[in-house]
Amino acid sequence: MVELLIVVAIIGILAAIVIPEFQSHSQQAKEAVAKENLRILREYLRLRMGEGQDITLSSIPKNPFNNLNTMRSITDEWPGPTGEYGWHYRLSDQEVKLDWPGLDSAGKPYYDY
């Protein structure tokens, strides 16, 4: 019985060490996907606008944090991250930002990607 308790305690200690590691990697994976989706979206918009074609929501990548592919068009100042949309798009300079509040694992705001 004592041996069984020792084994259970060791498994509990290992789980306490490993679970935060997996959560950290999950966050870093979302950050990498967000940066790549933002790169793809910027390139897509540059090409479509250059050709004078319309943008379709089915071709917009999803924001990995809120799983939305919606885009809010901005005419003037950036409103700041709300998390209500997938992306913010400013018409004047055709810039796109990730609509997600908070900081990444390096301390950089997601909105500044």
Image (cartoon, rainbow, N blue to C red):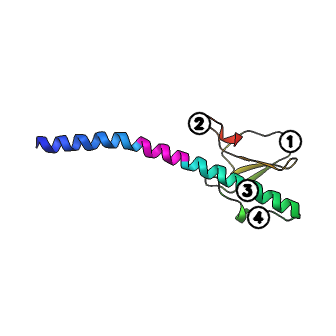
Q: CA distance from mark 4 to mark 3?
A: 12 Å
Kind of residue at disc 2:
Ala
Q: Which residue is mark 4?
A: 56
Task: Name above or below for residue 88 compared with residue 107.
Answer: below
Please state the horizontal and vertical placement of residue 18, each as a whole percent of the image.
Answer: 38, 43
Residue 56, quarter of the rendered image: bottom right
Helix, strand or loop status at disc 1: loop
Near mark 2 (Cα within 10 A), the count class, few <14, some 14-19 or many ≥20, is few
- What is the three-letter code of the residue carrying label 4? Thr
**Would you call the spot at circle 3 few (<14 residues within 10 Å), some (14-19), or many (20 or more)?**
some
How far apart, in angstroms, are the residues tagged by discs 2 and 4?
Answer: 33 Å
Name the N-terminal-most of marks 2 and 4. Answer: 4
* Position of the N terminus by quadrant: top left
Identify the mark nearer the N-term, 2 or 1: 1
Of mark 1 and mark 3, the one earlier in the sequence is: 3
Q: Are marks 2 and 1 in contact (CB under 8 Å)?
A: no
Give the extent of the magenta segment.
20-28
Main SS class of the magenta portion in the image = helix
- Label 4 to label 1, Cα distance in Å? 23 Å
The residue carrying mark 3 is 41
Mark 4 packing: few (<14 Cα in 10 Å), some, or many (20+)?
few
